[in-house]
């Protein structure tokens, strides 16, 4: 019996000093996929600096400046999830300070957020986004991973 595992690749952009090992991000992504019952997927996560993610934010989303995460889901309905998640490490570190989290925790949070977008989760814009089903699930998954979930 050939059991296929999801493919998860994490890369670190040139000059980026993430607050955690890339293997930790990979483990978090795999945790999300398992928890969501996804046996087949191809997910890449790129850890980027402000300059690189700001350039993507302008080019693809027509937004100015750095952001914490940009996600591209590239699969059709019924196909195994395929997507790219770009994490703005420096922006995540700044947000961590605002939210009382560690930089490592915030990088993991936005990576989990991006993977959930690849899996089809959506949230409203504005203040109500923090009470959305996606954000609640994101926080459940992050807590279970940080507490030793594999």
Image (cartoon, rainbow, N blue to C red):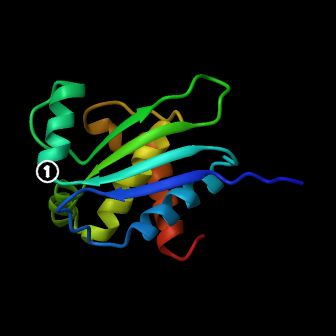
* Spot occupied by residue 28 in the image (x, y as percentages of width and height): 49, 62
The residue labelled by disc 1 is: 50
Above or below, 23 relative to 33? below
Answer with left or right where residue 99 lies relative to residue 122: left
- Residue at 70% over, 48% down: 39
Quick one: which residue is furthest to the front in this view? 14
Which one is nearer the viewer's eye here, 82 or 143?
82
Callout 1: few (<14), some (14-19), or many (20+) C-alpha neighbours within 10 Å?
Answer: some
Which one is nearer the viewer's eye here, 78 or 124?
78
Mark 1 lies on a secondary structure that is: helix
- Residue at 31% over, 61% down: 107
Quick one: which residue is furthest to the bottom in this view? 148
Q: Quadrant of the C terminus?
A: bottom right
Above or below, 150 relative to 94? below
* Spot occupied by residue 148 in the image (x, y as percentages of width and height): 55, 76
Answer with left or right where residue 97 lies relative to residue 118: left
Quick one: which residue is furthest to the right in this view? 1
- Residue at 17% over, 54% down: 49
* Spot occupied by residue 128 in the image (x, y as percentages of width and height): 32, 37
Identify the image quadrant of residue 129.
top left
- Residue at 23% over, 58% down: 89
Q: Quadrant of the N terminus?
A: bottom right
Answer with left or right where residue 136 lies relative to residue 35: left
* Spot occupied by residue 59 in the image (x, y as percentages of width and height): 19, 27
């Amino acid at each position: 019996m050939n059991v296929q595992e999801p493919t998860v690749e994490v890369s670190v952009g040139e000059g980026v000093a993430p607050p955690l090992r890339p293997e930790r991000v990979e483990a978090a992504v795999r945790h999300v996929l398992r928890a969501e019952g996804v046996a087949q997927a191809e997910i890449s996560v790129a850890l980027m600096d402000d300059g690189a993610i700001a350039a993507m934010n302008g080019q693809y989303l027509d937004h100015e400046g750095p952001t914490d995460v940009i996600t591209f889901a590239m699969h059709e309905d019924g196909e195994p999830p395929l997507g790219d998640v770009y994490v703005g490490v420096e922006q995540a570190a700044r947000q961590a300070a605002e939210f009382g989290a560690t930089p490592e925790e915030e990088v993991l949070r936005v990576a989990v957020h991006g993977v959930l977008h690849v899996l089809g989760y959506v949230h409203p814009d504005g203040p109500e986004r923090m009470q959305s089903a996606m954000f609640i699930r994101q926080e459940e998954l992050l807590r279970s991973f940080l507490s030793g979930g594999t």
